Amino acid sequence: MDFIALNLSDLTTPDRADRARKAWELYGTEHGDIDNPIEDLIADLLHLADTDEHPGGAAGVASRAVRNYEAELPAWPTTEVDVDAAGGYLAQMRVDGEWFTVGHEDDQRTAAGHLWKVMQLAGFRYSELAAHTEDLIAGHVLTSDDGFEFRVIEHDES
């Protein structure tokens, strides 16, 4: 977990917000009122994702953006996910020989999405994550060059 904590702790939430502040100010200047809701900018960016044909269109971009946002939250991943409240599938990674649950969902594909950020940090290429998601859904354990392992398993509630 030190590898992930080190890579996720370099920027705070205010630091990350400052990266977007210039774009937000320019957007407000171009549209006459800086008090436009941020939702308007986000909606326009989603339209851009559709028209520029980004992978998955607006829905794909929004889904990945939410996962990235959640992965960048300052408290993540300081504690293991409460598996007692877990959905049907667990997204896990193995560090130092122990499996660590980083997310859970009722759908395998959505559970695998919880692993995208940490897989990128472990060296997996972003362009290959969709194919790796299919591997995870098929039950494969994926291993990074640094020895980190990733899997999606059915949650055994026994």
Image (cartoon, rainbow, N blue to C red):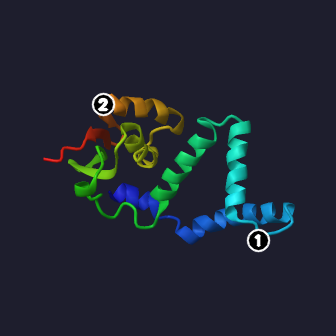
Decide if residue 9 is on the left or right side of residue 2. right
Which element type, helix, strand or loop, lies under badge 1? loop
- Dot 1 amino acid type: Asp
Badge number at residue 35: 1
- The image shows residue 155, relative to residue 25, as above or below, that is above
65 or 39: nearer the eye? 39
Q: Secondary structure at mark 2?
A: loop
Quarter of the image with the N terminus is: bottom left
1 or 2: mark nearer the eye: 1
Decide which of 43, 8 is in the foreground and name it: 43
Q: In the image, 89: left or right of 53?
A: left
Residue 103 on image: x %, y %? 35, 51
Q: Position of residue 147 (x, y in %)?
A: 31, 41
Amino acid beneath label 2: His
Image quarter for residue 88?
A: top left
Q: Which residue is mark 2?
A: 140
